[in-house]
Structure formats: C-alpha cells, structure tokens
Image (tube, helix red, strand yellow):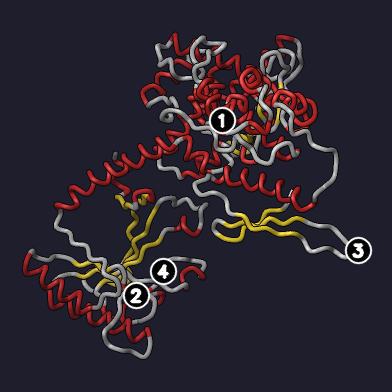
C-alpha cells in the first residue's frame, strides 16, 4: 500500500515506491496529493486515506495478475472472504460475531453483484433491519445491532476494494444512525450506596468482582482476565493486560486488549486492597479443600475449579439477580458499573485525557463521544456553581481591574475616584513586575525602584494600605534551605527599603515531597516597621488555593 504523509491541514501526500531500474538505481517514487472530504472524524479520515492509498498503488503499478471477476456477487465474495481473508485478519471472537451478522446480510444483499451495490441499496437495507425481529428478545433490532451489521459489511467491502473487485467501498458513509443517541445507564450516588450494601451481602467472589469494576472502570472480560501477578501490593496498583471472551458454542478465549491503550495500570484504595487480601486467603482455602494445591501468582483471581478463568456471562447473570433482590434499577448491567466510574471521574473534574487512559480508550475522542452527556452535565453544574459563587462576590465591595501594562498615575486616578464615590480601604496589586513606569529609565532595576517609590507615596496620599506582590529571584531555589530572604526580591533593593512590611510564603513540600510538613505554608515576616519578625504556620488546601488556621482544624 502507498505510504501516507500529512502535508497541510487537510492535505495528504500518497507515495508509491517504483523499485529499481536494471542498473540498480532507485526509481523516483510516484506521488499524488489528496484531500479528504470535510466533516470526517479522525477515524473516518484514516479509513478514507487507506482506501485511496490502495487504489493509487494499483493505479501506479498496473500489476498484471489473475483477472478479477467483476461479476462476482456479494454472496460468492463472502465465501472467498471467509475462507481466505477473515481467518488471517480477524480475532476469533470477532469472526464469530461477523458470521452472525452475515446471516442477516446474505438474504437481503447476497444476490447483488459487488459492482451493483450503492448507498441507496445499503440505506434501504439498514432501514429494513430496523424492523427485523431480535432472535433472542423477540423485539425489534436495536440501533447498536444495526450499526454492528454495517461495520461488518463495511469491513468486507473494504477488503473487496483492496482485492480489486470494486474501485470504492459503497458502504462508506452509507449508514446513518437513527434517533438521538441514548445516554449510557449509570447509577447515581444513592444507587451506588445501595448497590454496595447489596454486594456486601453476596459471597466474597461476587463482592470483589463487582467492586473492582466499580472502583476502576475496567471491562467485564478484563476483570475475568486478572491474575494474582497483576497486583502490585506495594504500589496498590493493578495491571490490566488481558481480556476474556466467551462466544456461544465457542471455547473460552483469553487475548490481549484490542489496542495498546487497553494495557494499562489502575490504582486501588486501601479498603479494596484489604478486600483483595481476604479474597486471596479464601481462594487458597478453596483450592486446598478441592485438593488442588496452593495458590500461584499466575492463577486467575476468578477461576473455575479446572483452572480456567470464569467467563463474563457468569457475573452478568448474578448481577441481574442482585438488582432484583435489592430492588435496584433494572436498566443497569455490569457494564453500567464502568460507565458509573467514568461519570464519577468526570463529575470530580478529571480531564478527558486522564479518564480515557484509565478506561483504556485509544483516543480521548472516544471518551468524549461516549460520555459527552456527562461532560455537558459537568459543565452545567460548574456554571451553576460559578453563578452561585458570583452572586455574593458581585454584591461585595470589591473592584477588579485587569488592564494590561497599567501605570501608577492611572492606578492613582482610579483609586481617587473609587475613594470619593464608594470609599476605599485596601489596594491589592498583582504584581509589581507587570507594571510599567511612565518615566524612562536606563535599566529595569531603576524602573522598579521608581515604581516602588511611587506606590509608597500613593499609600501615604490615600492613607490606605497597599499590598503588592513581587517576583523573587532564583536564589532561594539554589540554596539548601529554600526559605526566601530579603535579598531574593527581584530587580531592586528599593522594594525592601520602601515597604513597611515584607512577607514571604514558603511550602517545604514544594521542594521536598517526602517532608513531614505536608500541606503546610509558612508566612515568613522578614521586615516589620510596627511589630516583631517571625514565622506563622498555616494549613494549605491546594485545590481551593486556600489557607486555613491549623489550630481550628485540630479543634474540629
């Protein structure tokens, strides 16, 4: 296949190697620029480019070979595909599922020649499928099932393009999802608590299995594929490396995740680790009772007496029973625990890339597509909270001015007006080095000195305190004791000279994560015209950018 190189925003270069001439010199490769249709997703764009690359390579090379039968029907090609292509390309579980879809495709489309298929025929077929009966439930086919049939057909026709039977894939963008996308069933906070209570009344095996999925968001088959060697007890980490699949009438299949992103690490709470330890001891006891010897690291967490992993269907059946007995919502299923975990992460403000990594999604876009409603709800909630918070702030006698490159005369003028109209008790400036002086100075040091003197005069004139933030030099970071000193004030010693009080903030855990002074901030008073020097220790809550009194917290 031709190689694909990105050139511009919507421009790609297809390159086909033409080999060497009779003297061994490399021939100039053939090149062609293509532009994918607008409005495609990243995955759709990739698929379109791959098809174009195949067609262009065939066009350049003009490879003579066996003549292609262009009168072949879809049914005959599927026979060829099942025999020659699918076994080499697809996983065993995927092939089983595709054969189920093919049984629905052949009666309606099998008689068509491949070259006769078009979007209109395929769209009529999808509409007819939506009125077909579900063999298991007796109801109509779900839209998800129709989408799966389309994916199967689209894959078969893409292989037909590559083999030269047709020049393009007629199923490309033929499928249109009907109806609004349905939200994934998730459990709310109250339901989660009730579910946990119900799980604690089950045998330990089921309690551990369902709590693992709820806490980590792993898939059913991934939980079934866990081995004791996958647990890092020291780090409280769980390595997800495999997936268990069981198709009807087929043996248990243990395979690697579909994508590299599926191989991942999730982290466990102390409580869940304790529960796993208890389950480990019980597993040892069960093996001894059956006379199977001790428990080994490579044994599955959830194993059958013979040693094989338990299959997801076992837990699916049990979960439905738990829901019925606990009078819990019947629209939930085991996979809902995964969705619930994702929704809780999103509600906590976890970014989409992190959520995607924890769930094993190859692309964050997949996470956004699946959980867009959760992100939307989170945005609405954040806006509501912001509006609620802004209410008291808007009514408070606080004035914000974010004018860029503001000068001291401009600040003085605005402060005078505020003082006359509303009264003025305090001015906060963040920060000194962002200000500019109207007076031209030869150096930045002189300019900062001038700014410092002007602020001092303004404070005396308005008879109010002015609190000014200032940058520090890198001197503190280079010392063994990182606590700042007066000499660390950046740009000018005039700041120390003009200020009545100089205070520094210091957090030891910023420089030394292993320190015992976690979440402690020191307010260091290095200069004080009207009082003593010293250090005040405060608590620090990073997520709220908030200081608090340690003594108050200890009393509570």
Q: Which residue is mark 2?
A: 433
Q: Are marks 4 and 1 in contact (CB under 8 Å)?
A: no
Residue of label 3: 24
Residue 92 location, x and y as percent?
72, 25
Taking the image as shown, residue 270 lies to the left or right of residue 114, namely: left
Q: Nearer the viewer, mark 4 or mark 3?
A: 3
The answer to which of 378 and 431 lies nearer the viewer is: 378
- Disc 1, disc 3: CB below 8 Å? no
- Residue lying at the far bottom in this picture: please name it: 442
If you read the primary sequence from the N terminus, does the residue marked by circle 2 or circle 1 appear first?
1
Helix, strand or loop at mark 3: loop
Hey, which quadrant is residue 226 in on the image? top right
Secondary structure, mark 2, is helix
* Residue 306 located left or right of residue 119: right
Q: Mark 4 highlights which residue?
A: 484
Which residue is under mark 1? 218
Q: Earlier in the sequence, mark 2 or mark 3?
A: 3
Residue 212, quarter of the rendered image: top right
Nearer-the-camera pick, 305 or 477: 305
């Amino acid at each position: 296949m031709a190689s694909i190189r990105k050139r511009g925003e919507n421009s790609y270069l297809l390159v086909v190697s033409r080999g060497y001439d009779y003297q061994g010199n490399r021939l100039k490769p053939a090149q062609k620029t293509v532009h994918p249709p607008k409005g495609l997703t990243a995955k759709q764009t990739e698929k379109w480019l791959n098809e174009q690359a195949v067609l262009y390579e065939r066009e350049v090379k003009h490879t003579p070979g066996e003549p292609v039968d262009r009168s072949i029907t879809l049914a005959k090609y599927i026979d060829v595909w099942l025999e020659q292509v699918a076994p080499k390309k697809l996983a065993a579980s995927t092939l089983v599922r595709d054969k189920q879809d093919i049984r629905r495709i052949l009666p309606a489309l099998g008689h068509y020649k491949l070259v006769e298929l078009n979007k209109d025929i395929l769209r009529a077929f999808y509409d007819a499928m939506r009125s077909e009966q579900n063999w298991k439930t007796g109801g109509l086919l779900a839209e998800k099932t129709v989408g799966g049939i389309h994916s199967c057909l689209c894959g078969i026709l893409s292989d037909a393009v590559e083999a030269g039977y047709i020049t393009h894939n007629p199923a490309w963008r033929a499928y249109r999802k009907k109806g609004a996308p349905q939200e994934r069933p998730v459990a709310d906070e109250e339901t989660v608590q009730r579910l946990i209570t119900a799980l604690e009344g089950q045998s330990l095996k089921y309690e551990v299995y369902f709590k693992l999925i709820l806490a980590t968001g792993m898939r059913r088959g991934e939980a079934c594929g866990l081995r004791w060697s996958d647990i890092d007890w020291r780090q409280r980490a769980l390595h997800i490396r495999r997936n268990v699949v069981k198709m009807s009438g087929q043996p248990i299949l243990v395979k690697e995740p579909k994508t590299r992103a599926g191989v991942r690490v999730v982290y466990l709470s102390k409580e869940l680790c304790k529960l796993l330890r208890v389950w480990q001891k019980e597993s040892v006891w069960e093996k001894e009772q059956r006379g199977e010897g001790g428990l080994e690291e490579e044994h599955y967490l959830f194993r059958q007496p013979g040693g094989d992993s338990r299959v997801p269907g076992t837990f699916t059946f049990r979960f439905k029973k738990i829901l019925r007995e606990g009078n819990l919502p019947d629209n939930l299923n085991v996979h809902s625990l995964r969705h619930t975990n994702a929704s809780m992460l999103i509600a906590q403000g976890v970014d989409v890339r992190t959520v995607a990594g924890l769930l094993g999604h190859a692309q964050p876009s997949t996470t956004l597509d699946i959980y867009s409603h959760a992100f939307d709800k989170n945005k609405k909630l954040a806006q509501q909270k912001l509006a609620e918070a802004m209410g008291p702030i808007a009514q408070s006698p606080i004035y914000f001015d974010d004018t860029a490159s503001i000068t001291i005369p401009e600040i003085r003028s605005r402060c005078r007006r505020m003082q006359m109209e509303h009264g003025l008790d305090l001015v906060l400036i963040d920060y000194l080095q962002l200000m500019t002086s109207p007076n031209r100075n030869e150096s930045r040091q002189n300019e900062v000195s001038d700014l410092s003197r002007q602020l001092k005069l303004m404070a005396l004139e308005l008879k109010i305190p002015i609190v000014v933030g200032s940058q520090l030099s890198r001197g503190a970071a280079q010392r063994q004791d990182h606590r700042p000193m007066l000499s660390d004030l950046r740009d000018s010693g005039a700041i120390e000279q003009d200020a009545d009080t100089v205070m520094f903030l210091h957090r030891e855990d910023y420089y030394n994560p292993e320190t015992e002074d976690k979440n402690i901030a020191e307010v260091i008073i290095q200069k004080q015209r009207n009082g003593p020097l010293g250090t005040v220790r405060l608590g620090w809550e990073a997520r709220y950018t908030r200081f608090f009194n340690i003594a108050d917290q200890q009393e509570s």
